[in-house]
Image: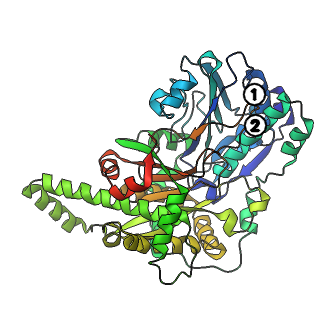
Amino acid sequence: MDEFISTVENQEIPLHPLDTQAAFMNVPYHFFYANDAGAAASFMPSETMRIAFYQALQKFPLLAGHLRSNGTGKTTVVVDRAHLNMPEYLESTSDVEFATLREAKFHHSAWPRGLSTTKAITTAGASGHIKLLNVHVVRLHANSGVVVFVNVPHYVVDGAGFFTFVELWGTLCRAARTNDPALRQEAVARPLCFDRGLISRSLPDKRTPLDTETVRVYTESSLIADWLAWLSPVMRGRVLSRAKFSSNVVSHTFRVSRDALAELRARVCAHLDELDVNVDDTHVLAALVSKMVAQAHAKCREQHEQSRSMLAALASWLVGLVSGSETKSSQSLNLLADVRHGLDIVEHNYMGNGLIPHNAQCPLKLLETPTTAKSLADATNIVSRVYAGADAPRVASFIDMISAEPSCFTRPMVYFARNPTSLVITNETGFKLYAADFGDGLPEWVCTIPSFVANFIGFLPSPPSSTDIIVNITLKQPVMQHVLKNEFWRDLATIVY
């Protein structure tokens, strides 16, 4: 730790408006490492891991900084050597054996107690400050393995920065254990960009107009959203943690075979007459999930209508008539895309947030129809065109919009709360979840916390031995019940837990 502190230089890093778009969320992951060499083996030794951790932190000094907000949506990370916000680094032991976790397919019910030290919402810790890095290393019974929990708030990184840090930590630990100075030098010499100005400097001159719904979500005034943006990060976290975003929410994890998905894509493409855009396997998967969730919501509404009395139905109609509210005829599908590709800055190793949502209003009449190759082709066409439109001019228009009013970052949150059928899908299959090797091999399983937030879908890579896609689905429990019964989905996907 002292070596790290001696390298710290005082600096202030003004965060980009992109950084605040998911600022109230955490990036929490668990890494499960098996010790198959026997109980007597030296496995991921504590002291070496701890030393390597602080060496990796030298490349990420902002993770020891404090958040400072001005109340208008602008946030700065302040790194002050005399008043560092040091990461939380915990170690503990457990009476759970790795074999127990493996037999449970890593279901959270088998995890060591207290493994996850943070939740989905970014909140202050015991110190009263928001830690920008939390680590919990849990040593399993009889030296059978180690579980590493790592969390970083979305304020400072997205998945790219998060997994870069974890991989670097593992590489430095491995280099120390194998006495490989060349490996260490290669790891620390890799340039990383924390300069948020790179985004603005990379924007093109051309602009493409954003869709109407996206503009409305980010620019329509909301007293609640503006109040949330005005709060300090600590107070906002306190409020949101009590909002019960995970109330009555359940998550399930599925495995989808690449071969089966490729076959489904071929059947879908046969119904797309004009293939003027690229149709990826994950586009078909996103369209299928979108239809499946819309169908589940429709069945929930149908059950609700059948169960309520005529008087309640009349009262609901009158309330809608007086308030002017309308029944939503479309699903707000938000597909997260990485601006690093759109702006052609991948080679810069940008460590800030690079994800922006691309919105599509998918007609419920289309989504709620029975799933066939033909109906899925119609939904896939919408998804593929959204991703095709995520080019530099459209990214620039989005950044112009959020930069003009930095406090707008809380408005999508309020929008999603008012539109419970909205869906967010993030494709993380390109992230390096299984790259961190501390000297005893790669993790056998990597996953996030058990229940994230409702209507959030994540596509993740499988362990290296497989090319399957892991799909994590988090929904309200009544909706999830119908998803689990969806025949088309059950034919394609295998439930992990």
Report helix, strand or loop for mark 1: helix
Three-letter amino acid code of the residue under disc 1: Met
Q: Which mark is residue 233?
A: none
**Residue sticking out furthest to the bottom:** 274
The answer to whether 35 appears left or right of 495 in the picture is right
Q: How is the image coloured?
A: rainbow
Marks 1,2: beta carbons within 8 A: yes
The answer to whether 417 appears left or right of 165 in the picture is left
Residue holding disc 2:
169
Query: For residue 2, which quarter of the picture?
Result: top right
Tell me residue 236's x, y (percent): 50, 44
Q: Earlier in the sequence, mark 1 or mark 2?
A: 1
Three-letter amino acid code of the residue under disc 2: Trp
Tell me residue 81's x, y (percent): 80, 35
Q: Is residue 158 visible?
A: no
Query: For residue 393, which quarter of the picture?
Result: bottom right
Report helix, strand or loop for mark 2: helix
Q: Residues within 10 Å of mark 2 (few under 14, many from 20)?
A: many
Q: Which mark is residue 49?
A: 1
The answer to whether 138 appears left or right of 440 in the picture is left
Distance, label 1 to label 2, CA atoms, is 8 Å
Tell me residue 231's x, y (percent): 52, 47
Q: In the rendered image, which quarter contains the N terminus?
A: top right
Q: In the rendered image, which quarter contains the C terminus?
A: top left
Q: Which residue is rendered at x = 35% and y = 66% of the image? A: 371
Q: Residues within 10 Å of mark 1 (few under 14, many from 20)?
A: many
Q: Foreground: 112 or 284?
A: 284
Tell me residue 182's x, y (percent): 91, 40
